[in-house]
Image (spheres, rainbow, N blue to C red):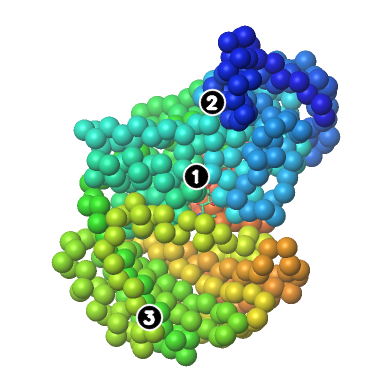
Amino acid sequence: MHRRRFVQSSLAAAVVASLPAKQSLAALLNLTTEVSADVPAMTGDGAEVTLKQSAVQDLSNSLRGQLLLQGDDGYDKHRRVLYPEYDKYPGLIVRCAGAADVRNAVNFARTENLLVAVKCGGHGAAGNGTCDGGMMIDLSLLRNVRVDPIARTADVSGGSLLGHMDHETMAYGLVTTAGTVSHTGVSGLTLGGGFGRVGRRFGLALDNVLGVDIITADGEFRRANKDENPDLYWGVRGGGGNFGVVTSFKFQLHPMQRQVVRGRFSFPGSEAKQVLNFFAEYSENAPDNLYVSGGVAARANGLGVSVSIIYSGPLDKAEDFLAPIRKAGTVAAEDVRTLDYVFVQKMGDNTDIRSVAASKSGFIEDLTPQLIDAIISGMVPHPGRSHSMAFQQSGGAIGRVAVDATAFPHRDSKANMLCGVRWPYGEEGAEHRAYVEDYWKDIEPHTKGFYTNDMLKESQGEVNLNYLGNYRRLVQIKDKYDPGNLFRLNANIQPSV
Ligand SMILES: Cc1cc2nc3c(=O)[nH]c(=O)nc-3n(C[C@H](O)[C@H](O)[C@H](O)COP(=O)(O)OP(=O)(O)OC[C@H]3O[C@@H](n4cnc5c(N)ncnc54)[C@H](O)[C@@H]3O)c2cc1C
């Protein structure tokens, strides 16, 4: 589609003409897309529609950010999410520069009945940050963190990444719970849960949300906190993106020292059962300032098992927690270091890209000997793939919140268990997919529900059940704030109206 861009002032035109990377200045200089034709699009119900050229032009003119249509410079970059297999082409991408743009986008999408995808960090396992034919609301221009060190709070814009938040808050010796890979989005992670290395001390990311600014499906700006719209405040803490687009979070921050101890121990696969039994007991009895992760992996040359910790307590006490791990089995490799917490939070970047098509996950309330047997016996080393099972620990402060205090109900879980099977991207994967489906059959009976942020293609019935006793209340909130189910690309709560 051929499209001409025009610049709204001659000064801006001169500046742009002199710069090679002019598209990156689009939002800054208020470049407006000239829409030259009607735009094909998709509704939420999957019907093909044609958007009138004039309507799309009005939308573009209303933005401080940028509208991207197929063929525009930047469209291909911004349509993408983390996982390359979600190779989708939105009908239009609205790059919102502020809450006013989000409002205009939501109003347009609702009026035209469009399918809507909301993208913050683009890490969503199901690829719901993008879509074919609908509107992608891209929040990547909306990245800002303002720390109030006196009140110990942070205002975090809805498109921010975890690394932005850790960087800004730790400058004042303050943190809030964030996940373990710094380029994950604050919004997706927080609205669905938010496990992380300090979660056992300070709760899930969502437990630290004091309030949100949100544009709901009717296009209204709403503040939700314990005093204003308390029902919505309850719902966004676990109900994901079901009610609207969060433009800003207010987080509670907590004092913490910069230095933490990281220890990683590997053991031979022949000791996998013994080490996992140790891991079960050790993580069960861990204090809140000890985050324990572990896992078993099958590669071409056999099994391996590991136990890792992040200790954020007094540094001179770290050895008390390292020593027992050394006795768990025959240590094949050990790496113990005192490190900057913000650096640790980036250590998994780029190396932790999981294969979505072949992953499985579920919460466990106990790592029983029977489950350990099932985990190990089903793992088959294979030259063409790697297979791992890891545990994202919960408990501590996460488990001390009542099941109905927020919409996130899985407070009794001891860990989120994640199984991933990877093979080189682009290679035929049918055999590996079948393998992981088969493997998970023996594991699943030991799980109780799943983390909505990791969900893939669960049925609507499974999604409803997974909200446990909080489901009915979530439907009431959905009926009030999104009765037309505009926000449906998520662990969807279907309205009853
Ligand atoms: C490498 C990697 C590491 C991870 N590590 C952790 C971890 O340590 N702890 C943990 O708890 N989880 C972790 N996760 C899972 C993570 O929580 C989810 O993938 C989460 O959805 C990512 O959010 P995002 O904003 O990056 O994704 P996106 O794909 O941008 O968003 C996911 C969904 O959130 C909703 N959404 C996004 N932004 C908004 C908004 N502003 N308003 C309303 N709705 C919105 C939309 O429904 C969207 O589809 C990890 C995932 C990956 C890929």
CA gap between label 1 and label 2 equals: 17 Å
| Sequence-wise first label, 2 or 3 | 2
Of residues 274 and 145, the one nearer the viewer is 145
Rendering coords of residue 194 (x, y %): 44, 51
Q: Residues within 10 Å of mark 2 (few under 14, many from 20)?
A: many
Asked whether 320 or 476 is in front, the reply is 320
Instruction: Kindly identify the amino acid type of the residue bearing the numbered disc 1.
Output: Gly
Q: Which residue is found at the position 43% from the left and 46% from the top? A: 162
Callout 2 secondary element: loop
Residue annotated with mark 3? 333
Circle 1 sits on which residue? 185
Describe residue 318's horizontal placement relative to residue 156 as left or right.
Answer: left
Q: Secondary structure at mark 3?
A: strand
Query: Which disc, if any, is residue 97?
Result: 2
Q: CA distance from mark 3 to mark 1?
A: 33 Å
**Count of marks overlaid on the render:** 3
Looking at the image, residue 126 sits to the left or right of residue 340; the answer is right
Residue 178 can be seen in this image: yes
Residue situated in front as seen by the camera: 286 or 298: 298
| Mark 1 element type | loop
Rendered position, 482 above or below 447: above
User: For the residue marked with disc 2, what is the amino acid?
Assistant: Ala
Q: Residue at x 81, y 20 (%)?
A: 36
